[in-house]
Amino acid sequence: MTMLRIFFFLFLTVFDSPAIFAQQGPPEGLALDINVVQIVLNDEHRDGVDWEAIVSDFHMLPLKKEDNSFWMDKRYHLSAGTVSAEDYAVLLDALDTVGKMSQIPQDSVHLTVDEPLAATLSLGEGKEQTVRLGLRFASSANAGPSITIDPTIGVIFKDGGKPPVALTLKTHTQAAVKDNTVIVLGGLTEETEITKTHKFPILGNLPLVGLVFRNQGRWMQKTETVIFLIPRVEAVAAQQPPPPPQTQ
């Protein structure tokens, strides 16, 4: 059992509440807070976060080419699921055990029932990947409120010694909007070649001779991007009867 899994299960109780947001009236829209977390994975967790052991409603979403739905590569997928709002705060602390973590807050979005909206996420400077979320909020008397999520991911595909190719990958999922629940999209990884020079103090800075006292090392740094969606249903206030006419 990894350190992250031990930390997570010792300090939280995962639950999946079936309760839907209490409404004064039918839902009018959805406010969606978005938080992007990036983790430079350490050697112990090079394969990424084990989301199946952490989230409820876990499912894997293969990413496929925009123009070829039969194309698949096991390196490109998303892991989807949910955690409770209370567990979300604990999870953010626990992710520090997987690697060096940073948060990139995003602008909140507001969804109206049955009106699609696209949100382009910021992943920070120097990132080759891009992420755009197609979002649609729906609600029915039987199923309750739900959100459809259509991620579009731009990646630089590297296949051995072949020239890198820019690809647009897509997938699709739907999640019920539940009380006290955060939607998780993880598993999006990117590898970057890092070059670092090691040198002896003073001697490594000498011209010509200093070449003997310094060397360069290269390694592949792997980063996982995680997207947290925190929904808040906006209800229509119950209509009040008009005031009685005033008598003269």
Image: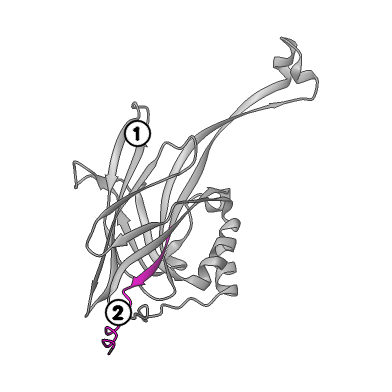
Quarter-of-image position of residue 147: bottom left
Gap in Å between the C-alphas at discs 2 and 1?
53 Å
* Nearest to the observer: residue 161 or residue 201: 201
- Left or right: residue 202 versus residue 83 is right
- Left or right: residue 231 versus residue 169 is right
> Circle 1 — which element?
loop
Up-down relation of residue 119 to residue 196 (above or below): below
Q: What residue appears at the point 75 percent right and 20 percent down from the top-left corner?
A: 204
Per the rendered image, the range of residues in magenta is: 228-247
Up-down relation of residue 26 to residue 165 (above or below): below
The chief SS type of the magenta part is loop
Up-down relation of residue 39 to residue 165 (above or below): below
How far from the left and from the top, in percent, is residue 64?
25, 47
* Nearest to the observer: residue 238 or residue 191: 238
Residue under label 2, please give it: 25
Residue under label 1, please give it: 159
Q: Dot 2 surroundings within 10 Å: few (below 14), some, or many (20 or more)?
A: few
- Residue 1 seen: no
User: Which amino acid, mark 2?
Assistant: Gly
> Circle 2 — which element?
loop
Residue 148 belongs to magenta span: no
How far from the left and from the top, in percent, is residue 158?
36, 34
Q: What residue appears at the point 24 percent right and 56 percent down from the top-left corner?
A: 116
